[in-house]
Image (cartoon, grey):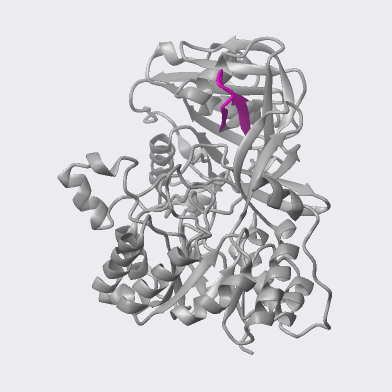
Amino acid sequence: MNFKLSNGAGILNWVTYADLGFDEFVTKSIGLNGPDDMSSMSEVLRAKYWNGELGRNGWNPPVMVHGVYEGKEYFVNRMGLPNPGVKKMIADFNDYKGNTPIIVSIFGQNDAELERIVNLFEADAESYKKIKGFEVNKSCPNTKPGESCSTNDLSNIISSVRVLKNITSKKVNIKFSPLVNAANFINPLEEAGADAATFYNTVPCLVINKYSNKPILKGGLSGQLLFEHAVYNVYNARLENESFPINISGGVSTVEDVKRAFSIGANTIQLGSVFAGKSKKEISNLIEKLRCGAVKAPYLPFKEPLWWNEVIKNGYLTVINDEHKEFEVERTIKESADTYTLVLKNNLNHTPGQYVMAMVWDKNNNPMERPFTMSGNNTITIKRRGETSTVLTSLTESDKMYIRGPKGNGYDIESLKGKKLLLIGGGCGIASLTDLAEKIDANIDCIAAYKDNTEILSNIEERLKLTANYKVRLGAKIDLSNINARMYDYIITCGPEPMIKAVAMWAVKEGVDPKRIIENWESYFKCGGYGLCSSCDTGPEGDRICLKTVYTYFESKNFRKRGKDGGLE
């Protein structure tokens, strides 16, 4: 039996990761991404939709949590199928120079959409020849009400197979929901002409916060917890059909898991959540390690896990999650007209430059979550920008908020001790630098840049004056013309991205080594800081800002920015 290691669909920047040792690679699920109300589309929008030019942002945070249930690790996500659209995916193929066979994951409201997606790829000969096949996602639980991207209807699935096999010579695989009995579907799928079946996508799951007893999200469960269900069903499917290719997806994490999956007749093992938080090198090493499991193990008895009874009864699993810890607000400090510092009653052990994911519920009990950089041992400084930041900055004494983290790498404090430092911050970025200045013994000059004096962070300013030679610069652009950059051991900057880039370019022009220019970055990301979706991936090296927040300019100078749909901008 041919044995292959692959990945489960979900990585937005697939070009960076495809050649890490996979036998084949599955892209992020791509759709035409039509609007909610298709009937009211303008002609211009309709043309963009049909030509694959629309992206999809997915749901707002919280969209992912992590925990342990009955001793097994799990992730639950409600990403909502974010994707850059077909045209940007085709552009990715033009960038891809590797040799790994690529499977394009696709989803659609109906067969016409699926057919159109395949036709758009086929029309671009350069990308089409790099495609081995298409995996049709019939199983995402995180779609909008009324969408038909997830179905257990055999006739619907068979229809899609026949339509696609009629128009393409590429392989056509179907990815199934865990609510499907694999043994009942495998023979009809083969008879319809499909080339493989993937068992399974994620299990519908409701996540309740342990401390507030309020729901965080309802999404799809993946990870080690899903493995027993997957192998039980693949084993039974193999009893029904000895030869039809089966991909197993669901919690494979160890060499022993690979042995078990191989022993029951899986042809391809798709890996996913096991990559959480891992670098490209770590992923490559893990693939090589797991490949050692490509030997048949002795027969092991298989049975459904006990928690599956709840899924059968309710249609989903409920888990109590303690990842978001409860914190009580001691007081709120108004820093400027629209910026506030929340002072918590308890400290958060962290390194300056790290961030936390802060969550609250609105008046309608809808959860809201956003990342914020720490500004002190027990302080978070927040600028009012949207609904989440408005609710957070309205908290008062004894109110509760829920935090997971800290996340990111933060500054290397030891390397900065005793050095002469120039800190340059803009807006709320100056709050993060205040946290740094208070925690190192160094000779510090600090410049705080604001558009005008109404933006000055009053309490932060008083804290900085105690630890640094502090100056304020006002204006749309920061004036550094009278600063001798080369007199400093390190120049450290935090703030809006244009300011970070401008400071770095100025320092390089002044003759500063790019490795001595340190930047604290923020980025939009979807997975909530686990390094799983790669929406904050910065380029060929695979750095993800949700995992690593502090870089030197030597590392960041070739960063590429992605939009909310995951496409390169």
Q: Position of residue 341 (x, y in %)?
A: 60, 17
Against 300, residue 140 (above or below) is: above
Q: Is residue 368 magenta?
A: yes
Q: Determine whether, in the image, residue 541 is placed left or right of residue 310.
A: left
Q: Determine whether, in the image, residue 22 is placed left or right of residue 126.
A: right
Q: Residue at x 79, y 59 (%)?
A: 305
Q: Residue at x 50, y 76 (%)?
A: 189
Q: Nearer the viewer, residue 404 or 420?
A: 404
Q: Determine whether, in the image, residue 311 is placed left or right of residue 16.
A: right
Q: Position of residue 137 (x, y in %)?
A: 48, 62
| Quarter where residue 93 is shown | bottom left
Q: Nearer the viewer, residue 61 or 464?
A: 61
Q: Determine whether, in the image, residue 550 is placed left or right of residue 159.
A: right
Type of secondary structure dominating the magenta stretch: strand
Against 528, residue 343 (above or below) is: above
Q: Which portion, as a residue range, is magenta? A: 357-369
Q: Residue at x 60, y 12 (%)?
A: 462
Image quarter where the N terminus lies is bottom right
Q: Residue at x 55, y 73 (%)?
A: 197
Q: Nearer the viewer, residue 157 or 63?
A: 157
Q: Position of residue 511 (x, y in %)?
A: 43, 47
Q: Is residue 534 magenta?
A: no
Against 452, residue 11 (above or below) is: below
Q: Is residue 18 visible?
A: no
Q: Position of residue 75 (x, y in %)?
A: 66, 50
Q: Is residue 7 visible?
A: yes
Number of numbered tags placed on the structure image:
0
| Quarter where residue 251 is shown | bottom right
